[in-house]
Amino acid sequence: MFAAGETVRVKDAWPEASGPVHIRTPWYVRGQVGEVVRRLGSFPNPEDLAFARPAERRPLYHVRFRKGAIWPEAKPDDELLIEIYEHWLERP
Amino acid sequence: MNILEADSARLLAAVRTLLEQKGIVSTAEVRERMAVTDAASPGQGGRMVARAWVDPAYRALMLEDGTKAAEALGIMMRGMPPLGVLENTPEVHNLVVCTLCSCYPRAVLGYPPFWYKSASFRARAVRDPRELLASEWKTIIPDDVKLRVVDSTADYRWMVLPERPSGTKGWDEDRLARIVREGDMIGVTVPTV
């Protein structure tokens, strides 16, 4: 579980490389550090749901990223707010 | 039979009959869903925005729980993903995109505009949103306003609650609702009079 305000890193994982997947974590934030804004609830894991497998409910968070950290030319204070499942987050 | 060559009306009738016979979806449920889909349009979201502009308690509810706020205006939300509402303020402007596909708050905004699904909009919205808004919509986000790009990646759907434009003092809810456009609730434009 992560608390609001906690610093998190999105796992730098690429399951796409090893077979068919359905992943809701955009490529451009893999490995990036952000901040948990709040927990949005728990939802059946879409990675299983998409393949009609039993899907465990997983916590979903709204995570904020500084745009300047991802794209250096961006206006530094601008931000990205993205829904990310708990199993994609780690403590940096 | 090759499904690509099937008569689509007959195929649909066959699938619906099977769904009914197997007790998965009833005709009444299909009819209800068709009615909901037909009723969904940016006008629904516009009603919510206008109510929020005149009623602080509704505004608070809308920011807390978009689904409940939609239902409070009689918008059918059953079976829909939860709705989140992003508040534009003098300090923050929100822009919604779905870079992975085309997630969109259909219950309150209807079908997404064609450009919303384009690879170009999706890429530019996260990479260079200020340039995108300025060049395609002539929407200039001032330098002292933070631009927050909300990438709708998972189980929520997001709409923007824009700021009430000046020059609308004393307007009633219906009149306010008529100036709220689809783009204002995605964040590519702002309401004007």
Image: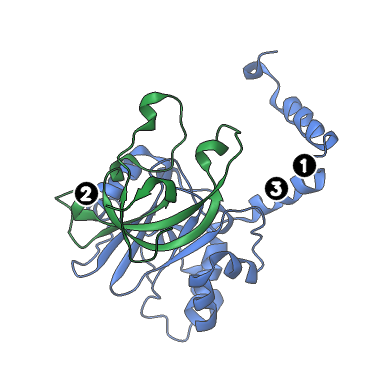
What residue is rendered at 45% in x and 61% in y? A39
Same-chain status of marks 1 and 2: no
Q: Nearer the viewer, residue B32 or A25?
A: A25
Looking at the rendered image, the quarter that the N terminus of chain A falls into is bottom left
What residue is rendered at 65% in x and 18% in y? B3
Pinpoint the chain carrying mark 3: B
Pinpoint the chain carrying mark 1: B
Pinpoint the chain carrying mark 2: A
Rounded to the nearest whole Å, what is the CA distance between mark 3 and mark 2?
Answer: 42 Å
What residue is rendered at 51% in x and 74% in y? B50
Q: Is label 1 or label 2 in front?
A: 2
Q: Is label 3 or label 1 in front?
A: 1
Q: Earlier in the sequence, mark 3 or mark 1?
A: 1
Q: Is B174 situated above or below B17?
A: below
Q: Nearer the viewer, residue A53 or B82?
A: A53
Helix or strand or loop: what does disc 3 sit on?
A: helix
Rounded to the nearest whole Å, what is the CA distance between mark 1 and mark 2?
Answer: 45 Å
Q: Nearer the viewer, residue A22 or B171?
A: A22
Residue B137 in percent (x, y) is at 31, 55
Q: Is B142 situated above or below B11?
A: below
Chain B in the picture: what colour? blue
Type of amino acid at the residue the image marks with label 2: Ile
Residue linked to disc 1: B25
Residue sitting at the far left: A73
Assess whether mark 1 and mark 3 are in contact (beta carbons under 8 angstroms): no
Count residues near mark 3 (Cα–Cα under 10 Å), then give few for <14, some for 14-19, many for 20+.
Answer: few
Count residues near mark 1 (Cα–Cα under 10 Å), then give few for <14, some for 14-19, many for 20+.
Answer: some
Residue linked to disc 2: A70
Residue linked to disc 3: B34
Type of amino acid at the residue the image marks with label 3: Met
Same-chain status of marks 3 and 1: yes
